[in-house]
Image (cartoon, rainbow, N blue to C red):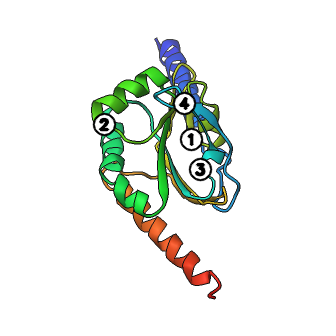
Amino acid sequence: MLKLIVGGLAALLLVASAVLWMLRPGTQRLEGSVAPDFALPDQNGQIHRLGDYAGRWLVLYFYPRDDTPGCTREACRFRDDIGILGDLNAAVVGVSVDDARSHAGFARKYALPFPLLADPDGDTAAAYDSLLNLGIARFARRHTFIIAPDGRIAARFDKVDPATHVQEVADTLRAMQRAGAALAPRP
């Protein structure tokens, strides 16, 4: 009986160690570094590349799954505040490991006016250190990046509250744009 208990505890420790190893932070993309390029299809099959957004701000947000409560709340907040972000010269793009067909249904169901990019292999999520790989299942972590018009990461959000995140992104964009305008040479 004792041998069975010890064996069970050893197996539990092995599983816990594996899970903690998979959840460890990776090499984070730091603010100021060049944003990794991507070429991914959206919900309509159109390929989007980082270069498509050159010259304007890009809010690139990663989310775990279509049609889940937190992801739906976050997507609908981006939808509801798309005008505010547009006024800040920012495009919004969502990315998850779901396929384009899943994205199409999700976007249609909630009338999402921005692209949802399919990253089924998780390569783009991994390049942004936003992939959670549990072996049998992979998810994009709920992370957001503000990419500056020059293609560099201007801000990174790792702790995202779907209910308030869009306001945080808009406030950060405003502050960065004010700071940039204050530094720009005057004629």
Which amino acid does the dot numbered 2 rest on? Ala
Residue position marked by numbered label 2 in the rendering: 111
Which amino acid does the dot numbered 3 rest on? Tyr
Q: CA distance from mark 1 to mark 4?
A: 23 Å
Q: CA distance from mark 4 to mark 2?
A: 18 Å
* Residue 81 falls left or right of residue 144: left
- Residue 155 at x, y = what percent? 55, 60
* Residue 91 falls left or right of residue 28: left
The structure residue drawn at horizontal position 60% and vertical position 60%, both measured from the top left corner, is 148
Residue mark closest to the camera, 1 vs 2:
2
* Residue 180 falls left or right of residue 36: left
Which amino acid does the dot numbered 1 rest on? Ser
Q: Within 10 angstroms of label 1, few (less than 14), some, or many (20 or more) residues? A: many
Q: CA distance from mark 3 to mark 4?
A: 14 Å
Residue position marked by numbered label 1 in the rendering: 130
| The quadrant where residue 14 appears | top right
- Residue 13 at x, y = what percent? 54, 28
Marks 1 and 3, the one that precedes in the sequence = 3
* 127 to 183, vertically: above or below: above
The structure residue drawn at horizontal position 56% and vertical position 24%, both measured from the top left corner, is 120
Residue position marked by numbered label 3 in the rendering: 53
Marks 3 and 2, the one that precedes in the sequence = 3
Q: Within 10 angstroms of label 3, few (less than 14), some, or many (20 or more) residues? A: some
The structure residue drawn at horizontal position 36% and vertical position 49%, both measured from the top left corner, is 78
* Residue 49 falls left or right of residue 66: right
Q: CA distance from mark 1 to mark 2?
A: 25 Å
